[in-house]
Image: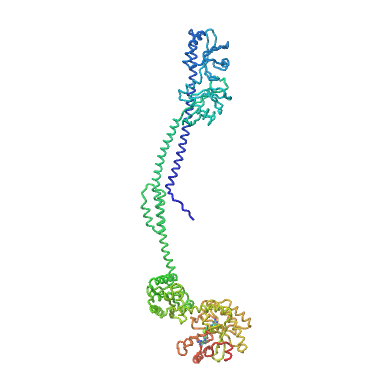
Amino acid sequence: MIKKNIFLSLKWKTLVVICVIFTCAVASIGHTIYTEGTRLFEEQLAESIRNNSSALLDQHRRSLIEIGTSVSLAGRNTEANISEESLRHYLDNNWDLMELEWGLESLFIYDIATQSTLTWGRESDIDFDKMLKRDVTKGPSTTTLCTEFCTIYAKIPLYFMNGKKKYLFIGTGLVDFIINFAQKNHLKAALLRKSSQINHTSSSFESLPHWHVQIAGMTEKEAYFPIIEQLANVSTFETVKQNGKTIHHTPDDQYYYLYAIPLLDNVNHSKNSEFILLANNISHEKARIYDTMAYSGLITLIGLICAIFIVFYVLNSPMKRLQQQAKLLPLLAKKQFEYVRTSIRHHQRFQYTRNELDVLEDTAIKLSSELEVLYDEIEQRTGELEKMALFDVLTGLANRRMFIEQLKGLIENARKHRERFAIVFIDLDNFKRINDTLGHDIGDELLIEVSKRLKSAVRDTDTVARLGGDEFTLLLPQIKSLDHAKVALDKVLEKFQIPVILNKNDYKITPSIGAAIGPDNGMETDELMRCADVAMYKSKKNGKNCYCFFTNEMNSALQEEVKLEAELLDAVNNKEFRLFYQPIIELKTGKIAGFEGLIRWNHAEKGLIGPGQFINTLETNGQIIPLGEQIIELACLDRHYLNSLGMSDAWISINISAKQFNDPLLVDKFQTLLKKYKLKPTSFQIEITEQTLISDIDKQAKQLNILQKLGFKIAIDDFGTGYSSLAYLKKLPLDTLKIDQSFLKEIPNNRNDIEIVSAITAMAKNLSLTVTAEGVETQQQEAFLKEIGCDFSQGFLYSKPQPLELINQSL
Ligand code: C2E
Ligand code: MG
Ligand code: MG
């Protein structure tokens, strides 16, 4: 089962894809701008802080040296030399001022020779000797020393007038410097001392255990310490030292960039190292980056809307065209070719460039044209096929299918308008014989002629059809009474009065006609056709060349026939048949020359039934073959009986039906039975009707030859009723012609019959055949036969067919 999904236009799908792509692009660009912007900003900040702080430290150091130098110069009493006395005097007088003016913490004059120190300001336990040994610079320099507090010392060498060399050390506190530096640069600053051993005892030091760091001093302690603590929790000291770190300080909702700068000097006499941890409030810059992002986001959003609008605009027209095609293409199946083409053309606009849609539309137009041609062809062919399917190719009449359709229409019409109609079945009498003897082409000619006659006999509104072979049908609508139908059927019979010229010879063709009336005889096609068929068989039984209307009695006759057929089947199985015999008299001597065996059915209720009532049925259902074997066996038994009566010269004639004769096992069966009863073929004559010998002359001649060579005499029964020509007879190995009893009936009154019988006899003589006349009932007939030289005579004049023992008694 096909699952029907929700329809979503390509247009919307494309828009969704564009939105997703744009959003991803914007997110990724925004993210890049933000991270890169922040990184660059932080890098630049770090760089500038580093440079600034280094420069300021240098400057501070330089200014400390300058102070030292100016102090040393202040102690000069002559132009060239410094007097120790005057320097000391100067310092004693000016120290307080210098401490205040320059923020000095302490001042020392150190004598290397005596390792003695003169001190102004705060006392110190500095080992000046060690410091000087470490300091490789001979001239003025600075050193940062940290004990409890960090101090920057400027070292100035002093050359006194008395030749002594001493050193002037002036120190200033680093914390003050940093505070000064931070305030000037709007920074928060802290002096960190990295130490493996954290001194918890000192109350003036805050410590950061994660970093192994002690804070020697800081600006805005209340505000800055929580920030440093937060930083120490989220980052290592190394990271802060190398790259700096930005944190968001939640309590004041501010962003800080923190960076640690080492305080490196040319002398480092402490194991500990000091760093300045600077915090720059970058909230403002962050906000600017966010603003930039928001701005670029807005621009992107506007761009996205514009893109959606453009895509919508660009896709709208193709989508509409595609939808139009989707609506139009199914119309091709409804054969609306022209409409499809004009609709597509109507929507096409001139364009400088072509796209896939134009190609598709052109293809659809081409497809519709080609399909139109194809459909036309199909319709034409279908018409031809329909004609072939509905009309008979040979005669051009309606065929069975068409006939049934028309019949259905008539039935429907009769139902609605209470009209009566006639359905007529016409079968040509003896058509098979003409077809077989004159050939199929002549047979076809006859069928065409018959179809013309039938058409000319009825009205244009009537239907003439050929169901197959020589079976024709008529449908006569609007029959007011049975007489109307009779008039039409009389006209049909009249048309057959004129002989048909076939192969330059005149042939009298007669029809057997059966008619049924709808709705009187039924309202179903099958029912009406069966009724007409039954009526047609009644016509055949009535002597052909006539018509019969269906009656209910016919139906019961038919039922009788069906019943009989079932009974016959049992009768063959139960061997309920016996042979009666009729003597055949030699006209010259008047003696019995032979006996013809004639079958009788010994019915338990109806008594003896003649072959006329069952032979055809058995012939049709094939039961004639097993019955034929029983007949031969009965004849063999009677042969012995005749022999016992001393009539071994008289032959026994056995009638063989067409189906039996064409049975390839017939000869074997004869031989087996003759062998069984130890009899010779010469004491039997085989009678085959003229009508049997018409289907395959060569094959049948061969069969007859075999039988004749075995010793059987061969006779053609009912001669004169068929179409045997002289040439035809010459081909067959025959012994006797049996002239049909119909020719004897009116002798001597009918001149024609006299001539026919005389001619047949003369012809037979010519062919060296003996002649037997059947149905001889009168002395005159016998006299006539004698006169014309007929050999044998058979008829009621001598004896009716009887059981052999009864004939024996009458002889
Ligand atoms: P058939 O072979 O031409 O037999 C002659 C028929 O003419 C017999 O009719 C016979 O009773 C009848 N008949 C003889 N003389 C006269 C007469 O003077 N006047 C009249 N009106 N009729 C006479 P039956 O016995 O009814 O047989 C009819 C046909 O049935 C036979 O015609 C034969 O074709 C067929 N038939 C009879 N017995 C057999 C049989 O054993 N096997 C086969 N296959 N067909 C048989
Ligand atoms: Mg016979
Ligand atoms: Mg006969």
Answer above or below: position of 98 versus 616.
Answer: above
The C terminus appears in which quarter of the rendering?
A: bottom right
Q: Identify which residue, 429 or 770, lies in the foreground.
A: 429
Answer above or below: position of 421 versus 788.
Answer: above
Answer above or below: position of 634 versus 108.
Answer: below
Q: Identify which residue, 112 or 509, lies in the foreground.
A: 112
Q: Position of residue 690 (x, y in %)?
A: 51, 81
Number of residue marks: 0
Q: Position of residue 362 (x, y in %)?
A: 40, 52
Q: Position of residue 767 (x, y in %)?
A: 52, 84
Q: Quadrant of residue 490?
A: bottom left
Residue 671 visible in this rendered orientation of the protein: yes
Q: Quadrant of residue 213?
A: top right
Residue 449 visible in this rendered orientation of the protein: no
Report the coloring of the rendering. Answer: rainbow
Q: Position of residue 465 (x, y in %)?
A: 42, 73
Q: Identify which residue, 503 or 568, lies in the foreground.
A: 568
